[in-house]
Image (cartoon, rainbow, N blue to C red):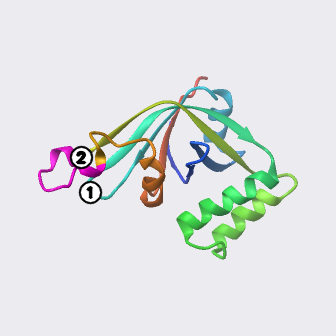
Amino acid sequence: MIQPIWFIYDNESSKIYVDTQKTTRKFQNIRRNLDKIYFSIDDENFPYKGVKGRAIAKISEDIQRNLPIVEKINLKYLGTIEHPLAKMIMENTKHPLAKMTMLRFSMKRFTTSSSAFYDKDVDKSEFSGQIHFSAMSRMSLVCMSLVCIFYWYP
């Protein structure tokens, strides 16, 4: 299953955070296969950059720990926590029988790419021969979604 999802990358912990509903097939697939997560993050702006790889997922049910992360994700994609969708997501996260949960992806391995190396008019000095993993935090500010591939085994 391939699914675009909202995410936030934490530069300090080098983790990707995703909030999702517990009732979705995506969540059920992840829960069954926590060590088989493949991801791709692509910058839609030229010169195109990307990070893709494999991760291990952990599920966090800690509402107090999850709320600030959910707030950051809402701010990133909606620009405010006052948006009706942001309010609904926050309420679903706060509820004692929370419908939402937090997924934390720890990268096992990854590769990076850039189209800048193929364009003679792009300044390549910022890439230093490759996109460093730390560039992922800058990319996450402009990427609209993280695409994860979740293997589903019947």
Image-quadrant location for residue 16: top right
Q: Badge 1: how crowded within 10 Å, few (<14), some, or many (20+)?
A: few
Q: Is there a contact, CB below 8 Å, between mark 2 and mark 1?
A: yes
Residue at figure coordinates x 46%, y 46% from the top left: 134
Image coordinates for residue 104, horizontal then vertical, percent: 64, 41
Quarter residue 25 falls in: top right
Q: Picture coordinates of residue 29 (x, y %)? A: 62, 33
Q: Residue at x 65, y 72 (%)?
A: 81
Query: Where the C terminus falls, by quadrant?
Result: top right
Q: CA distance from mark 2 to mark 1?
A: 8 Å
Along the line of sight, which residue is nearer the eye, 57 or 98? 57
Residue 14 vertical placement versus 29 (above, below) = below
Q: Amino acid at mark 1?
A: Phe
Residue furthest to the bottom in view is 82
Of the pair 54 and 22, the residue shown nearer to us:
54
Is any atom of residue 79 visible in this view?
yes
Q: Residues in magenta?
A: 115-126
Q: Nearer the viewer, residue 66 or 128?
A: 128
Quickly name the residue at label 2: 115
Circle 2 SS class:
helix
Q: Which residue is mark 1?
A: 46
Taking the image as shown, residue 36 lies to the left or right of residue 129, namely right
Residue 122 within the magenta-colored segment of the rendering: yes
Q: Residues within 10 Å of mark 2 (few under 14, many from 20)?
A: few
